[in-house]
Image (spheres, helix red, strand yellow):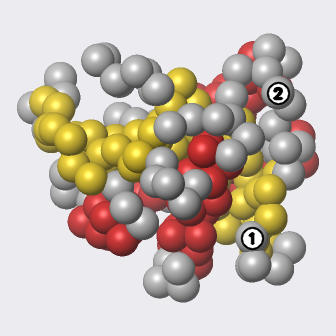
Amino acid sequence: MKTPVLHTRRLLLEPYAPADEEDFVALFQDAGVGRWMGDGVNAEAEDRALFGRLFTKVYAQDLFGVWVVRHEGRTVGHAEIKPSPTPGVDGHEIVYAVAPAAWGRGLGTEIARTLVAHGFGALGLTEVHATVNAANEPSLALLDRIGFRHVRDLTEDDGGTTRLLTRTKGPEGL
């Protein structure tokens, strides 16, 4: 399924275009954002290569949904829903990032809710997962507010702890 354009009351989530590269790199190079993504802030060249793979691999092979998130025409974040890479987790995982200039306005909650709704609706999932660094209290609180529950802790190669959270589809659809 081709990555669809998604709308919320305030946000537009659309597939990246080549012109979005600078915004993508700036978001992932930001220390406040990058510290929570994967293994932390990468070299700029790695983020540029990752951006290129969105087109040559993810979109070209229709692997999973990846979006640039815009608010009032400006890039404010990144969103994904993809098969979980976490060992022992069967299903899909959401990933989101919000630019620091947009923190504190509920945009992360809006993105996460949109990803969950897309997973339950268009993708037909019955549960959605998220993995969050145990020290990332704002993201843990956000996911708790929208119905995710802690399943277990995972110990990373560097000794750090990542929390596995799951949201199960309810009878009302979400």
Q: Viewer-proximal residue, 93 or 96?
A: 93
Residue pointed to by mark 1 = 8
Residue at (72% x, 60% y) in the render: 69
Numbered disc 2: secondary structure: loop
Give the x, y percent position of residue 145: 36, 71
- Up-down: is 167 above or below 64? below
Taking 96 as reference, is 16 left or right? right
Q: Is residue 151 visible?
A: yes
Work out how far the residue at label 2 is from the one at label 1, CA to CA, in angstroms: 20 Å
Q: Write down the quadrant of residue 48 in the picture.
A: top right
Q: Amino acid at mark 1?
A: Thr
- Up-down: is 20 above or below 47? below
Q: Viewer-proximal residue, 30 or 98?
A: 98
Residue at (53% x, 79% y) in the render: 106
- Up-down: is 166 above or below 144? above
Considering the image in quadrants, where does the C terminus appear? Answer: bottom right
Give the x, y percent position of residue 125: 57, 35
Considering the image in quadrants, where does the N terminus appear? Answer: top right
Residue pointed to by mark 2 = 1
Taking 12 as reference, is 91 left or right? left
Residue at (45% x, 39% y) in the render: 127
Residue at (47% x, 83% y) in the render: 104
Q: Amino acid at mark 2?
A: Met
Taking 84 as reference, is 153 left or right? left
Q: Viewer-proximal residue, 31 or 56?
A: 56
Q: Write down the quadrant of residue 80 in the picture.
A: top right
Taking 91 as reference, is 161 left or right? left
Numbered disc 1: secondary structure: loop
